[in-house]
Amino acid sequence: MNLRREVEGPIPSAETHAEIPDDRMERIITKLFVFLVLTIVAHGQTVEAGWKGILPLISSMGDVEKAYGKAENIDDNGYHNYRIDDSFIQVSYATEPCQPNQYNRGKFNVPANTVLDVWVTLTKAILLTDLNFDRPKYLRDVSDHTGGIHYIKREMNVMISAGIRDEHGDEYVGRIVYRPAERLKAKLICNKI
């Protein structure tokens, strides 16, 4: 079997490739750049997967410490405070299951030190359009008296808070709040406390 095929005309040389018109080269570079950005975004973690993979009623304190490190401190409201490169994070944890306490953190039938909620404050605001989330599934709420804009996914209890911060009307994300998803709450809530 002969795998060699005949090529019509001269074999392109390095000089031939250098003669690509500027506008065509610009289109090629633009397409390559868009492809790379879409590839990075497609493989990036979504908001729905939790902040660095941490989700209420699923993740534990051990998971949080792997993702964020040890807590800097515990505030007066019992939130554990973490600081990582791009954010300041506050996490509340469950206490003994189905036991009343000051902050009502025993209301779920989950092990102690299970994540209850996560408050993420971004240290560098990012454009909403750069955030990887399923935007059509979020309700956009602008009824806040502070002028804030909130994107809410009710069944997951995720809220993205944004504000308009530039002359172009671009929305920037400042905070993301994760609370227990409705389906997990219904399944894990204690009947009597």
Image (tube, rainbow, N blue to C red):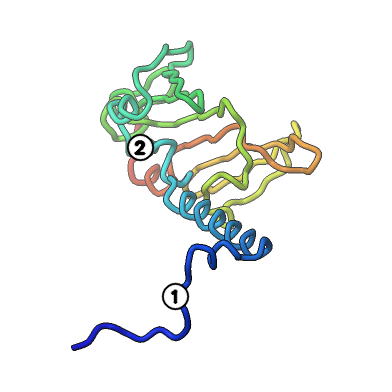
Q: Quadrant of residue 163?
A: top right
At x 40%, y 42%, the residue is 185
> Dot 1 lies on which element?
loop
In the image, residue 139 lies at what x, y percent? Answer: 62, 51
Position of residue 61 in the picture relative to residue 25 (left or right):
left
At x 40%, y 31%, the residue is 116
**Can see residue 193?**
no
The N terminus lies in which quarter of the figure? bottom left
At label 1, counting other C-alpha atoms closer than 10 Å, the crowd grade (few under 14, some 14-19, many 20 or more) is few
Mark 2 sits on what residue?
Answer: 57
Q: Nearer the viewer, mark 2 or mark 1?
A: 1
Mark 1 sits on what residue?
Answer: 11
At label 1, the amino acid type is Ile
Given the current orientation, which residue lies at the most extreme bottom position? 1
Residue 2 sits above or below residue 68 on the image: below
In the image, residue 147 lies at what x, y percent? Answer: 76, 35
Q: How many marks?
A: 2
Sequence-wise first label, 2 or 1 = 1
In the image, residue 61 lies at what x, y percent? Answer: 31, 26
At label 2, counting other C-alpha atoms closer than 10 Å, the crowd grade (few under 14, some 14-19, many 20 or more) is many
Position of residue 169 in the picture relative to residue 118 (left or right):
right
- Between residue 149 and residue 39, name the one nearer to us: 39
Position of residue 68 in the picture relative to residue 178 (left or right):
left
In the image, residue 174 lies at what x, y percent? Answer: 61, 32
**Can see residue 65?**
yes
- Between residue 108 and residue 148, name the one nearer to us: 148
> Dot 2 lies on which element?
loop
At label 2, the amino acid type is Leu
At x 34%, y 18%, the residue is 70
Residue 73 sits above or below residue 134 on the image: above
